[in-house]
Image: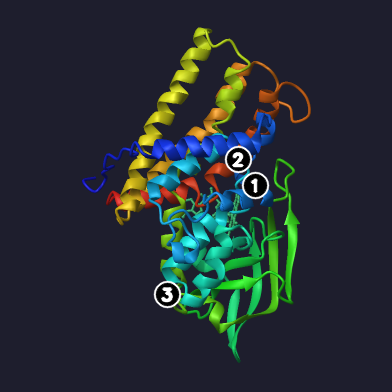
């Protein structure tokens, strides 16, 4: 347990200027958009909004300037992400590129890949989807079966991916494929590749979620060609690259703020002097404050080039528990039936959040998988 330390970290005062700027940008962009339209924030896909974010320098904030980034600190990026989610901004179009693909390319991409993709991602001219999961293979990712076979000049892909968010609107996919197979060493032989979504042989089929939104898909590959120069990192090194990518993805404010906007929406509609409301809201705010400190601490450790995987897994587990509780607590306090079509703004926002909430603890690694990582980090398994 001695390894479990959350180093104290304060957001520097000068970031309050960044916070004020992003708040004013969001007021300008979102205006008085009701909570019910803001609620899908994570899955809200709005290329015009993403392009405006790019123009303001809110994408790739930590990347070097030569690749279109802002060369700013990870803590500045944290403040921007926090404000975007608290406001329910539609971040989904640029989110995978900003959070996962960009940092991955910076770390493992070739010079040509960085020059081609990073500036375009930072301007939101292109969007990436991320394809890891396959039918029957989610948590046990090393068991993926989609194959890349070597051919002249590159690789031929065959197989199937599932739950691929935005595959129907992305220009490129960052996919994980099996390039070799040794039964007793299944973590070897996995390789990440950039796939052009317009490639012949690639088919995207929609999957609707419980909220009736279409944001994820099934993708099939029938001899899809990928040239050699679109392999990311070393052939066969995909597993360790993915672990880095997921650790980065697990720690941010997005892991406890997915349902935050239910709270201000609720407080606009209930009597805040009611002791029951005060007690329940007080509990939620206390949990939010603690999680925020833990999450900022992880951001501080990442900024100092440490690898706080255990702490990040803890923040995600506790954070998704809170963001799943929040719509339920708010629905009880609202004392009205949440409904997607009628009722108050808060009732409609809650109708969405209640149906979306089960996914909060699935995306990016399930609760049980995180608890396994936590147990291992504590030396318990
Ligand atoms: C909104 C959303 C967006 C997504 N977007 C993407 C995307 O863009 N790209 C992508 O590749 N994937 C995406 N996913 C898929 C997601 O990563 C997987 O759903 C997740 O990893 C779980 O995999 P699974 O669905 O196959 O469930 P399984 O792995 O089959 O798990 C089923 C249940 O068994 C439990 N379980 C599994 N293994 C163990 C174990 N060893 N010990 C204890 N319990 C265990 C799990 O915790 C879970 O409760 C998305 C999912 C959601 C909900």
Q: Can you tell which quarter of the image residue 32 is in? A: top right
- Determine the CA span between mark 1 and mark 3: 44 Å
Tag 2 secondary structure: loop
Residue assigned mark 3: 185
Give the crowd class for mark 2: few <14, some 14-19, many >=20 residues within 10 Å.
many
Is residue 140 among the parts visible in the rendering? no
Q: Nearer the viewer, residue 77 or 54?
A: 54
The first of marks 3 and 2 along the sequence is: 2
**What is the tally of numbered marks visible in this picture?**
3
Q: Residue at x 70, y 69 (%)?
A: 220
Q: Earlier in the sequence, mark 1 or mark 2?
A: 1
Q: Which of labels 1 and 3 is toward the front?
A: 1
Q: Quadrant of residue 269?
A: top right
**Does 222 appear above or below 297?**
below
CB under 8 Å between discs 1 and 2? yes
Determine the CA span between mark 1 and mark 2.
9 Å
Note whether residue 174 is visible.
Answer: yes
């Amino acid at each position: 347990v001695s390894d479990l330390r959350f180093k104290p970290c304060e957001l520097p005062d000068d970031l309050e200027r960044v916070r004020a700027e992003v708040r004013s940008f969001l007021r300008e962009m979102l205006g008085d958009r009701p909570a019910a339209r803001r609620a899908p924030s994570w899955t809200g896909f709005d290329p015009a909004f993403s392009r405006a974010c790019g123009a303001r320098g809110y994408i790739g904030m930590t990347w070097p300037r030569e690749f279109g980034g802002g060369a700013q600190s990870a803590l500045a990026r944290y403040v921007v992400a926090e404000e975007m989610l608290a406001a329910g901004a539609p971040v989904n179009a640029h989110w995978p590129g900003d959070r996962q693909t960009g940092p991955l390319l910076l770390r493992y991409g070739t010079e040509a890949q960085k020059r081609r993709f990073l500036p375009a991602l930072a301007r939101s001219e292109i969007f990436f989807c991320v394809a890891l999961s396959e039918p029957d293979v989610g948590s046990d990712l090393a068991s993926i079966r989609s194959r890349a076979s070597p051919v002249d000049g590159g690789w031929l892909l065959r197989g199937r991916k599932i739950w691929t968010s935005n595959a129907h609107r992305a220009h490129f996919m960052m996919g994980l494929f099996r390039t070799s197979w040794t039964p007793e060493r299944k973590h070897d032989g996995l390789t990440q590749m950039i796939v052009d979504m317009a490639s012949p042989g690639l088919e995207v089929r929609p999957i609707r979620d419980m909220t009736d939104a279409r944001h994820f898909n099934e993708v099939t590959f029938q001899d899809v060609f990928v040239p050699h120069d679109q392999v990311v990192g070393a052939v066969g090194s995909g597993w360790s690259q993915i672990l880095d990518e997921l650790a980065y993805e697990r720690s941010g404010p997005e892991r406890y703020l997915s349902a935050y906007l239910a709270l201000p929406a609720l407080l606009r509609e209930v009597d805040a002097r009611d002791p029951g409301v005060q007690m329940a809201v007080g509990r939620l705010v206390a949990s939010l404050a603690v999680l925020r400190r833990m999450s900022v601490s992880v951001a501080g450790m990442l900024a100092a080039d440490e690898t706080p995987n255990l702490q990040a897994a803890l923040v995600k587990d506790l954070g998704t528990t809170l963001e799943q509780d929040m719509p339920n607590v708010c629905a009880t306090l609202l004392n009205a039936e949440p409904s997607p079509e009628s009722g108050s703004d808060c009732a409609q926002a809650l109708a969405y959040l209640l149906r979306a909430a089960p996914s909060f603890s699935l995306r990016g690694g399930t609760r049980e998988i995180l608890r396994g990582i936590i147990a291992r980090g504590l030396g318990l398994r």
